[in-house]
Amino acid sequence: MESTHTLSSGLHSLVIFRNLLNDPVISRLLALLDTDPSSGAPFVDAYCEFASALLARTDDFSQYLLGAALEDENFYVTGAGSRTSGLLDSRLETELKFLQRLSQFDGSGCRSAAPDGALLPVWTTSPQDFVAAYRETLENLPQKGYGIYAKYHVFTVSDGRLVPVRHPDPQRLSQLSGYEAERGKVIANTLALLEGRPAVNALLYGDAGTGKSSTVKAIANEYAHRGLRLIEVKKNQLYQIPDLMDSLSANPLKFILFIDDLSFSSNDNDFAALKAILEGSVSSHGPNLVVYATSNRRHLIKESFADREGDDLHLADTMQELLSLSARFGLTVTFSRPDKDLYLQIVEDLAALYELSIDRDELIRKAESFAIRSGGRSPRTAKQLIEQLKSLG
């Protein structure tokens, strides 16, 4: 086992993986390596601070260090494919080989040199090939990504930064019934994005509860393994998006910028922000990103007769601007309220999915009655009914 001084020097010398020095476990390891085992309480504190941070996550230090290295958003991985450098490649291999040696640090030497070292906690290590694992990560960047993009596939936005959603809606395409033709258009556009073919921004318009949002979320879940990521954005965050899109343009993954339940008033400041995102800015978004929006309004603008009869000298131009926003989406898919046959088909499909044991005639009677009480037929109404029946046993 290498000396603590050698391991400490190696950590301090990291260049590509320098972000690891801020890792909550690695930073405590560095403090431990820099503490003399004979110092008594200071060493015990440093040792146990590291052990506590590690054991709260795993008892295998080798696996933890490898995971931290593979998820690190360093300048080598973010620039992969855009530049090549023999010097940089050599440095990468040097640091990976050092990290592999570091991953075998089991603390035994520190414990044997410390007074009462037998009382200190232990952890395990395991054989790991850091160079091979990192090469595999680089080869799979278009599908798996790097950093937080490799660990999560759904994100929200906060203060202009992406925040991962740790427990996203698990909706799958196989759980959706009806509207196959409508969903097929969105799926085809998404596959074009994933395959590097031209893809367009899409507006999913229609009645409430018809599965517009569920379609987008299910598509994101279905194709996450192929490198698709979903970023959900609220309307009042649209002004933050241009900078975010610039940062994503060089990312090897594909992104859906998802704006749910979109509508504007005629004097809404966010109106211009969306126009710029869709088409009108100096720098357009990259080919690895599309905008998917859902709305109950075909033209997205809350329009009144007062708007039509206002005092604008160029009223026709103003109205044309308001109505042109939806035309900036290259694909518009309409989700209409289902008729009786489609509604009952959805109810029966969901009953089978939920393994609900109930007579078909009784199910149809309950479905129609529930739709009347709920204000109309829709996939959402059908799902609420089935979930209610399932909960009642």
Image (spheres, rainbow, N blue to C red):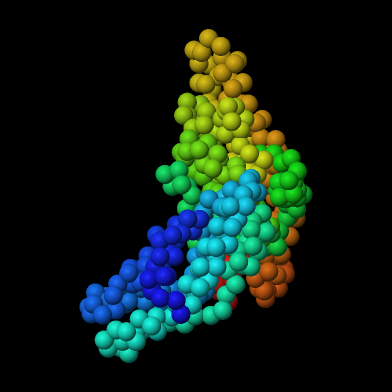
Image quarter hosting the C terminus: bottom right
- 134 left or right of 5 in image: right
Q: In this view, does 268 lie above or below 79?
A: above
- Left or right of residue 228: residue 263: left
Between 323 and 258, the one nearer to me in the picture: 258
The correct choice, above or below, for 142 with respect to 387 in the image is above
Q: Is residue 308 above or below residue 358?
A: above
Visible residue check, residue 67: no
Question: Is residue 265 placed above or below 72 in the rendered structure?
Answer: above
Q: What residue lies at 38% left-to-right and 74% top-to-bottom?
A: 4
Q: Which of 72 and 168 is in front in this view?
A: 72
Please give left or right for residue 39 compared with residue 94 in the image. Answer: left
- Whole-percent x and y of residue 384? 58, 61
**Number of numbered labels in the structure image:** 0
Name the residue rendered at 73%, 60% in the picture.
Answer: 345
The residue closer to the viewer here, 309 or 185, is 185
Between 177 and 188, the residue placed more toward the observer is 188
Where residue 282 appears, as percent x and y from the top left, is 58, 27
Q: Where is residue 197 in the image (x, y as percent from the top left)?
A: 75, 43
Name the quadrant containing residue 105. Answer: bottom left
Confirm whether residue 14 shows in the render.
Answer: yes
Residue at point 55% right, 39% down? 246
